[in-house]
Amino acid sequence: MLNARSSLSGSICALCIAVLSVMCAVIPATAGAVSVTMEEIRLILSTTRDFSGKDLSSLDLSGMDLSKSSFHKAILVKANLKGVNLSDSNLEDTDLTGANLTGANLSNVSLCPSLLRNTVLVNVNFRNANFGSAIFAGADLTGADFLEADIHEADFTGTDTSKTKNLDTAAHRDTAIGLPKQ
């Protein structure tokens, strides 16, 4: 009888672990970010392209084509995103603090409101991007191109914008915080 209980108990535990694994995979982003592996990233890219609520902190995603993806409420703190293509993606409420996006393509993206504190954004293509209330504090924007970008209430406090391209003609520049007067 004891062996039958042990066997049944072991089967129930295995079933519980399997159920919990499935449940963890479908927890909504509002319950907190879920860490992912590179294998999971490849799977997501080949299917839904939805990284919403995922924790991609400190991952090396350099050179990847992440265009037309959703990163809503994703965490990319200190991620290596050098040369990535994020064009036409949703980056709303995304935390990119300390990430390196040197040479990345972020044209036609939405970053309302996202954290870009102390982020390396050297030579990034921000053409036609929407930055409503994004926070750029301390970011390196050397050579970043803001042609036709919307910077409505974006915060550039403590950021050197003197070496950017087309920031002076960005939409809603008058509402941005921390920019020098024209």
Image (cartoon, helix red, strand yellow):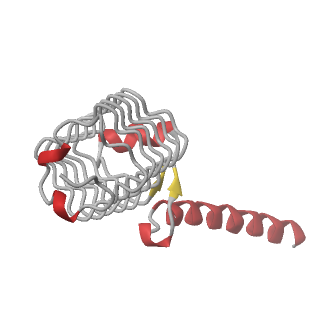
Q: Give percent across and percent down for residue 143.
A: 28, 31
Q: Is residue 81 visible?
A: yes
Name which quarter of the figure residue 41 lies in: top left
Q: Give percent across and percent down for residue 130.
A: 19, 55
Q: Is residue 28 visible?
A: no
Q: Give percent across and percent down for residue 140.
A: 41, 39
Is 125 on the left or on the right of 75, as rendered? left
Asked whether 47 or 171 is in front, the reply is: 171
Asked whether 38 or 98 is in front, the reply is: 98
- Looking at the picture, does residue 23 appear above or below residue 44? below
- Looking at the picture, does residue 84 appear above or below residue 10? above
Q: Give percent across and percent down for residue 137.
A: 42, 53
Asked whether 75 or 47 is in front, the reply is: 75
Residue that extends furthest to the right in the rendered view of this protein:
2
- Looking at the picture, does residue 106 appear above or below residue 35? above
Name which quarter of the figure residue 67 lies in: top left
| Quadrant where the N terminus is found in the figure | bottom right
Residue that extends furthest to the front in the rendered view of this protein:
182
**At 41% across and 35% down in the image, what residue appears?**
81
